[in-house]
Amino acid sequence: MKVIAGNWKMNGTRNGLKDMVAALQNVETENKVILCVPFTMLGVDGGKVSLGSQDVSTHDHGAYTGEVSAQMISDTGAKYVIVGHSERRQYHNETNDIVRQKVEAALSAGLTPIVCVGETMDEKQAGKTMEIIESGVRESIPNNIDKDIIVAYEPRWAIGAGLTPTTEEIAEAHKLIADTLTSMGLAGTPVLYGASVKGSNAAEIMSIPNVDGVLVGGASLKPDDFIPIITSVK
Ligand code: 13P
């Protein structure tokens, strides 16, 4: 069983989500399918698909105009939230410290956070990939948690670029993440790979050791692109 999560980013409509949910109802799979959609689409009946958001406030409630709390997300029936996506880190200056606070907020409301880590092209070229990944995991995830989380490795330079790391690079990153999680008492936490996943490379990527599923951007927007990813693995 793999986890196949879609990240719609700032795309789609409620009717479009209903169409996607309808298209996925007849797909035979044992994989766990999640769609993380804009806040405005939460509350749509996901059927077999679990829904999630793409961000969450660090705060519970109060005078934080424009923010959405974990409790509010949970109130829509959503079960997941992407936290620390590279686009949040890039455009909203989210640091590991902020991400950790968001993970805490999500967990306290019963949501499962999908915590993203990954290196930029500059960091990769400076030979810092492993350091960034390990500190991302250690600093973005609170200590002593006893609830489920998911981690996603998203090499930032490969997102939306049609680029993917080599099989060896993905294997090395995922082994480091799995070992780091084990040292934090979080052995068995699913680790997803995300960046330029499509139907033609999904099975190969998910055959790499320690890759427990995928987090898919562009190719999660249309059933014709997303379904082949879901059915590419048992
Ligand atoms: P793409 O699949 O479009 O590269 O996006 C990856 C991503 O950012 C998923 O969160």
Image: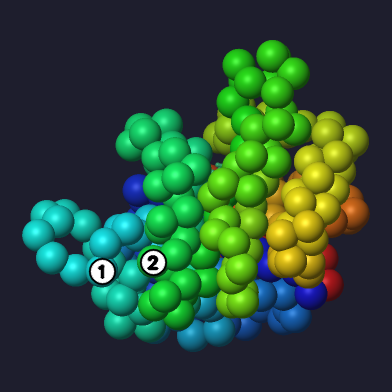
Q: Residue 184: give x, y in percent of width and height.
A: 72, 60
Q: Marks 2 and 1: in contact by CB < 8 Å?
A: yes
The vertical placement of 146 against 6, above or below, is: below
Q: Is residue 233 visible?
A: yes
Residue sitting at x 39%, y 77%: 109
The vertical placement of 48 against 16, above or below, is: below
Q: Which numbered circle lies on residue 60?
A: 1
Numbered marks: total? 2
Q: Quadrant of residue 128?
A: top right
Q: Quadrant of residue 29?
A: bottom right
Residue sitting at x 40%, y 40%: 94
Q: Which numbered circle lies on residue 68?
A: none
Residue sitting at x 79%, y 61%: 182
> Which amino acid type is marked by label 2?
Ala
**216 on left or right of 63:** right
**209 on left or right of 33:** right
Q: Residue 4: give x, y in percent of width and height.
A: 65, 64
Q: Quadrant of residue 53?
A: bottom left
CA distance for labels 1 and 2 = 7 Å
> Which amino acid type is marked by label 1?
Asp
Q: Residues within 10 Å of mark 1 (few under 14, many from 20)?
A: some
Q: Nearer the viewer, residue 153 or 136?
A: 136
Which quarter of the rendering shows the C terminus? bottom right
Task: Say whether disc 1 or disc 2 marks the residue closer to the N-terminus.
Answer: 1
Q: Quadrant of ligand 1?
A: top right
Q: Nearer the viewer, residue 227 or 132?
A: 132
Q: Residue 185: give x, y in percent of width and height.
A: 74, 66
Residue sitting at x 90%, y 54%: 209
- The residue at which mark 2 appears reads as 105
Which quarter of the rendering shows the N terminus? bottom right
